[in-house]
């Protein structure tokens, strides 16, 4: 009887471990997303509103928020299906993704016309652009004296959406979220003999959790600066990330991406990507704020 009970408990724990196991496609894992949001929040220039500069703890908590919507248990299937493609863009060749339209429906039409399913290719540039526009709309409201009695509400929404935007920007800094080779080399040509084994989760979660600390990359992040063309700069950021894919696979050959990897080059590679994500995010937040003044009165 006792044995049967022990077996039942073990079985329950086994099931629980499946339920709470991190999803293999959560870019940067929980830690990396929190760190990127916090590092960006710490780089806000003095002319950023004080409420925003004081919100780094909440912004950090919100870093993993969209991954919380990706729980793959049946109960949340509708939610998972609806927004999973917002976390990546499968760029095959960068030249095929030049001059994209600036909204997701025109982009979807373009993909369908070439026989591709948009939900397989991903919407990452648009989740970033739409998130940016959401916070700019709110910054405009915040500046408008007619809304002064509701400023508190507006501030809460700005922080929420800014934190969520951070998630997608951080995903974009993870090279495997910008490529068809997102979890093992996937094309028939493979001249460098890159691994076809799964490495996505090992790279972004296992390695980052065990070998990286936020202070390894945060000093590389510079104070935020204003962007000139948000969508073009977002695409450039995603192409830069995509250009690191081969190097990531090369490093896997030198030192496997896992918790025991103590290779200095591997660490340098990952800290540079985390810093790139935090930098782009800081720039987007700051640009949303500064450009919200120009839109005023239109
Ligand atoms: Zn994600």
Image (cartoon, rainbow, N blue to C red):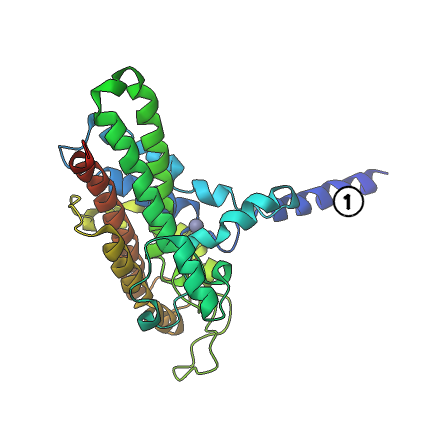
From the top left corner, tell me how far across and down residue 268 is, in percent.
Answer: 27, 60
Q: Is residue 236 visible from the viewing direction of this image? A: yes
Coordinates of residue 293 in the picture (x, y in percent)? 17, 34
Write down the residue under mark 1. Answer: 7
**Of residues 102 and 165, the one drawn nearer to the viewer in this rendering:** 102
287 or 296, nearer to the observer: 296
Please name the residue shown 25% across and 40% down the image.
285
Question: Is 222 on the left-hand or right-hand side of 261?
Answer: left
Q: Is residue 139 above or below residue 234?
A: above
Vertical arrangement, residue 102 with respect to residue 135, above or below: below
Label 1: element kind: helix
Kindly identify the residue that appears in the image at 44 percent across and 51 percent down: 86
**Quadrant of the image occupied by residue 10:** top right
Question: In the image as oriented, which residue stretches furthest toward the top?
Answer: 149
Specify the farthest residue to the front: 298
Position of the C terminus by quadrant: top left
* Residue at left offset 51%, top offset 63%: 117
Instruction: Locate residue 134, reporting x and y percent.
Output: 33, 38
């Amino acid at each position: 009887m006792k044995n049967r009970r022990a077996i039942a408990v073990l079985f329950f724990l086994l099931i629980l471990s499946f339920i709470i196991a991190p999803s293999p496609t959560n870019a940067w894992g929980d830690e990396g997303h929190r760190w990127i949001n916090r590092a960006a929040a710490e780089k806000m220039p003095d002319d950023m509103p004080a409420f925003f500069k004081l919100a780094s703890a909440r912004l950090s908590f919100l870093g993993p928020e969209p991954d919380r919507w990706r729980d793959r248990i049946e109960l949340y299937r509708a939610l998972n299906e609806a927004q999973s493609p917002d976390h990546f863009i499968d760029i095959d060749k960068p030249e095929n993704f030049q001059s994209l339209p600036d909204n997701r429906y025109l982009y979807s039409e373009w993909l369908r016309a070439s026989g591709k399913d948009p939900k397989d290719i991903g919407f990452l540039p648009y989740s970033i652009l739409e998130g940016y526009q959401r916070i700019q709309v709110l910054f405009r409201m915040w500046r408008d004296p007619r809304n002064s009695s509701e400023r508190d509400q507006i501030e809460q929404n700005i922080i929420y959406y800014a934190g969520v935007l951070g998630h997608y920007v951080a995903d974009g800094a993870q090279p495997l979220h910008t490529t068809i080779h997102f979890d093992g080399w996937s094309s028939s040509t493979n001249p460098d003999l890159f691994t076809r084994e799964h490495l996505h989760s090992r790279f972004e979660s296992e390695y980052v959790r065990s070998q990286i600390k936020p202070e390894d990359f945060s000093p590389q992040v510079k104070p935020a600066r204003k962007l000139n063309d948000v969508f073009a700069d977002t695409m450039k950021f995603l192409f830069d990330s995509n250009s690191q894919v081969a190097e990531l696979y090369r490093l896997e050959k030198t030192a496997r991406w896992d918790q025991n990897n103590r290779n200095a080059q591997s660490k340098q590679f990952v800290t540079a990507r985390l810093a790139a994500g935090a930098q782009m995010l800081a720039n987007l937040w700051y640009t949303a704020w500064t450009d919200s003044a120009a839109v005023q009165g239109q």
